[in-house]
Image (tube, helix red, strand yellow):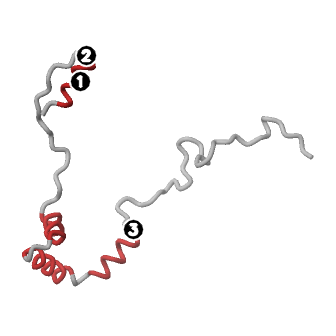
Amino acid sequence: MADRTDENQPKRRGPGRPFAPGVSGNPAGRPAGSRNRATLALEQLFDGEAEVRSRKAIEMAKGGDLGAMRICLDRIIAPRKDRPVKFQLTTIETAADAAKASAAH
């Protein structure tokens, strides 16, 4: 049996960390802008039918279908993100003040 000392042992990085810091197993990585195969397949499947399906969703939305309305609005106007919310906050000096401020409407 070979003599196993600490210097002969490979350095363990722990589970899920087989590479040294800053070194990737795939240095080239996924190309920027590349798309998922499933997304590409779905686009090919629906290519040419987008107008028909859009018109159907609009008709359903006009008929009161809430799901169709949501789909139409999501496509027409992107959801806004990071909107600031303005509100008045009382002065907080103690923990009791924090509880009162969080309960205030």
- Which comes sooner in the sequence, label 3 or label 1? 3
Considering the numbered disc 1 on the image, is that residue within a helix, a strand or a loop?
helix
Question: Relative to the observer, which residue lies in front, 45 or 22?
Answer: 45
Question: Relative to the observer, which residue lies in front, 54 or 5?
Answer: 54
Local crowd size for mark 3, using a 10 Å CA cut-off: few (<14), some (14–19), many (≥20):
few
Position of 8 relative to 35 (above/below): above
Residue topped by disc 3: 36
| Amino acid at dot 2 | Thr
Position of 45 relative to 27 (above/below): below
> Residue visible at 41% across and 60% down?
31
Question: Where does the image place residue 38, in percent across and percent down from the top left?
Answer: 39, 73
Report the Cα–Cα distance between label 1 and label 2. 7 Å
Report the Cα–Cα distance between label 3 and label 1. 47 Å
Taking the view exactly as shown, the residue that stands out farthest to the right is 1
Question: Relative to the observer, which residue lies in front, 95 or 87?
Answer: 95
| Amino acid at dot 1 | Ala
Residue topped by disc 2: 94
Q: Quadrant of the C terminus?
A: top left
Report the Cα–Cα distance between label 3 and label 2. 52 Å
Position of 97 relative to 45 (above/below): above
* Residue contact between numbered discs 3 and 2, judged by CB atoms under 8 Å: no
* Residue contact between numbered discs 1 and 2, judged by CB atoms under 8 Å: yes
Local crowd size for mark 2, using a 10 Å CA cut-off: few (<14), some (14–19), many (≥20):
few
